[in-house]
Amino acid sequence: MTTGNAAQVFINVGERTNVTGSAKFRKLIEQNDYPAALAVARQQVEAGAQIIDINMDEGLLDSERAMTTFVNLIAAEPDIAKVPVMIDSSKWSVIEAGLKCTQGKAIVNSISMKEGEGPFLEQARKVLRYGAAVVVMAFDEQGQ
């Protein structure tokens, strides 16, 4: 058995590039101010984030377009692209749009069995084909 201290296994995930968790970031995306939105991601990396969580789940946004635009812009910024991105959405179409643009290893946050076993397995296979890691939520069709 391997032992280690918590500092060796702790991963710092930058959550400020999340339109549902940051009003400032949401406003930047709604205003198409992607240079300022990139600055938010850059600040997280400079502050020690080892993963950047990106979420564009906002009812008034074209979430797929916003995810694609932002992930492509991150890929062109070496100081940000040096850390993996976590594609965070409750909508598979948004997750897949982000995966199509990622450079290197991505993490999907998240898939579950809320829509049934068939869709879950299909999504899991696609995540594998994209070469991404995945967070699986322990929900079934009843949300249990």
Image (cartoon, grey):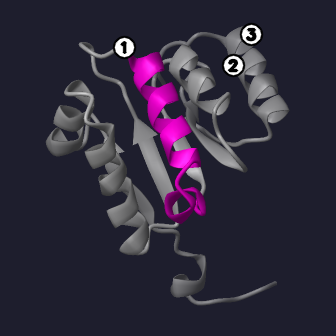
25 in the magenta segment: no
Point out the frontmost of discs 1 and 3: 1
- How many angstroms separate mark 2 from mark 3 (CA)? 5 Å
Q: Are marks 1 and 2 in contact (CB under 8 Å)?
A: no
Mark on residue 120? 2
Label 1 Cα neighbours within 10 Å, binned few <14 / some 14-19 / many ≥20: few
Relative to 55, is 28 on the left or the right? left
Dot 1 or dot 2, earlier in sequence = 1
Whether residue 15 appears in this view of the structure is no
Q: Is residue 5 placed above or below 66 in the rendered structure?
A: below
Dividing the picture into quarters, in which one does residue 8 lie? bottom right
Q: Which residue is drawn at the image coordinates 44% and 67% (left, top)?
A: 49
Q: Are marks 2 and 3 in contact (CB under 8 Å)?
A: yes
The residue that disc 1 covers is 62
Q: Which residue is drawn at the image coordinates 77% and 24% (left, top)?
A: 126
- How many angstroms separate mark 1 from mark 3 (CA)? 27 Å
Instruction: Read off the magenta span.
Output: 62-83
Q: Is residue 97 placed above or below 12 in the rendered structure?
A: above
Label 3 Cα neighbours within 10 Å, binned few <14 / some 14-19 / many ≥20: few
Q: Secondary structure at mark 2?
A: helix
Amino acid marked by disc 2: Phe
Q: Secondary structure at mark 1?
A: loop
Q: Secondary structure at mark 3?
A: helix
Q: Is residue 92 placed above or below 12 in the rendered structure?
A: above
The residue that disc 3 covers is 118
Q: Is residue 129 placed above or below 106 in the rendered structure?
A: above
Amino acid marked by disc 3: Gly
Amino acid marked by disc 1: Asp
